[in-house]
Image (tube, coloured by chain):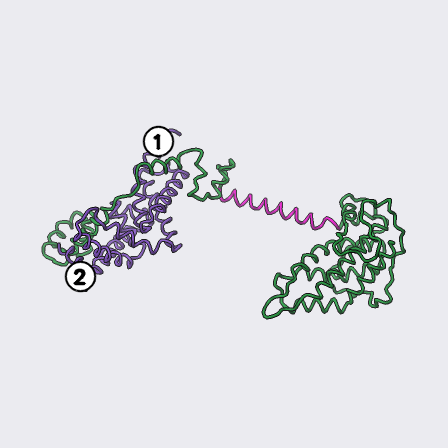
Amino acid sequence: MTCNQTEKVSLLIDGELPALEITEVKKHLKECSDCTAAHESFLLLRSQLSSYASTVDAAAIDAALAKIVSPRDKYDTPAVSRGWRERLAAFGFGGTATPRFAAAAALVVLAVTIGIVSLLLKRPDPELASGSPSTPITAGTPDQVSGTRKPQVQKPAGAQPATPPAKPKPAQTPARNVPRTPRRRPDTAPNYSAIEANVATNDQTLEGAEVELITARHLEQSELLLRAFRNVRSANGGKAPEIRYERQRAQKLLYQNMLVRREADAKGDVQVSTLLGSLEPILLDIANLSDKPRNEEVVAIKDRVERKSLVPLLQINSAAVARAYD
Amino acid sequence: MASEDEEFTTLFQDFYPSLCRFLECLLGGRIALAQDLAQESFLQLHRSAWDAMPPGEARFWLYRVARNFAVNEFRKGQTRTKFFDRVVEVMTPRTRNPEEEYEAKERQQLVLEMWQSLPEDQRVALLLREQEQLSYREIGTVLNISESKVKIDIFRARTALREDWTRRSRAGATVATKELKR
């Protein structure tokens, strides 16, 4: 059907045919109708394609050129997205903008970030320990965090404040909003700055009244959180339980819980320390829940809260601590 | 620095219009986009060590980059449908009488459908050959393919277009048949 010389016709019209074959192919064209038709078709196609003229006018050319060669617009041409090399070059790193340099810079940034994060995470432990030299604080053991330690306070009725009631010293905390009743408003933000300041300044141990107040507030906040979590609706119709608020609160209270527990340890308040140690893994688990947790995860945490009787224990202890403060 | 800018200006004025035309055909007549991509190609060239390139290499480099930009646009799927609309315009003579207009319209319709069947690499190779008059070796340089592949791609593109054209003509596209027999 198709002559096997047609490919040479294509080469002929493109000027790509070897000189020795040109005469031969031209001769073949006179004899082969198929190749003659192909030759005409190829030339027609060429004329149609090459007849198209560009629509760019001189003004558009000048404008486009100005955007490229103008120093001011050299790196600000909106039509082009700048790469990292250009960004670095804009800051004077053009000569060093090599992949090796970029990798080294990335490693340095990563190392600095890890260092800062690790410093921030480790900061409370040594500072708290050194802040109360007379009563050294035992570092938290893994089982305290993982929640395997059994709470020693099992009977709410028998729970008593382990610390002796300390009289309030208004002169020492004039600026604080000291509550007059054991039950305070839920929206009263507890002031933990005293502990944190103590940690930061490596100061002496806080006054007993301040610690009692902070502990009472923390216990109350934790109790409210656990009550709220207990009331979280279970998954219904494929919709995940809404625990965003509880999770955020748990994340806040977790850090505070560590601080207060260590203060209680330092004071030898075994009961409060044990209670907070029992609370910590619960807070940790709530804080680590996903945005859309499975129903089983929420129910499991609720069961643990109930099994450990954490809500009544927190209520009793916060009330007792507050009474002691009063 | 001034002489570099002058050289670049010359290069730009020589090749920007043809690069725009090349991109317009590839992108199916999206003139604004073609000009943007041509401008981007030149900007990339300006940022690179273009003055250290061997003579003539800048032109190939430009077509290579422009073609890659166009391929990216194809992959985005934004220009695929418009490509063949512009082919119609490419094939359109500037002035005709009504009869010629009608014939041209039918021929354009044929060309439109024929180009749809061409693979992208064959289409680019043929365009570079017919519009830019690049040699096979130069096309191979632009597309980073061997000269043999360029030869095969161009021949296959032409053959496919011709066969399709003939088949359609026999099926009743009398206007196109007249063009072929003329």
Which quadrant would the C terminus of chain B be assigned to in this image? bottom left
- Confirm whether the magenta stretch covers residue A264: no
- Confirm whether the magenta stretch covers residue A118: yes
Q: Which chain is purple?
A: B
Farthest residue to the top: give it: B2
**Is residue A54 left or right of A29 when viewed as pictured?**
right
Residue A228 image-quadrant placement? bottom right
**Is residue A259 left or right of A2 when viewed as pictured?**
right
Q: Quick check: A208 above or below A74?
A: below
Figure label count: 2
Chain where mark 1 sits = B
**Is residue A131 left or right of B177 when viewed as pictured?**
right
Q: Nearer the viewer, mark 2 or mark 1?
A: 1
Residue occupying image coordinates x 30% and y 46%: B22
State which region is magenta: A98-124
Residue A147 image-quadrant placement? bottom right
Rendered location of residue A315, percent (x, y): 80, 62
Which residue bears the numbered disc 1? B6
Chain A rendering hue: green
Q: Most prominent secondary structure in the magenta stretch? A: helix
Q: Quick check: A188 above or below A311?
A: above
Helix, strand or loop at label 2? It is loop
Residue occupying image coordinates x 49% and y 37%: A90
Which quadrant would the N terminus of chain B be assigned to in this image? top left
Chain where mark 2 sits = A
Kindly identify the amino acid type of the residue bearing the numbered disc 1.
Answer: Glu
Q: Tag 2: Cα neighbours inside 10 Å, few (<14), some, or many (≥20)?
A: few
Which residue bears the numbered disc 2? A2
Rendered location of residue A164, percent (x, y): 90, 56
Rendered location of residue A155, percent (x, y): 84, 68
Kindly identify the amino acid type of the residue bearing the numbered disc 2.
Answer: Thr
Rendered location of residue A152, percent (x, y): 82, 65
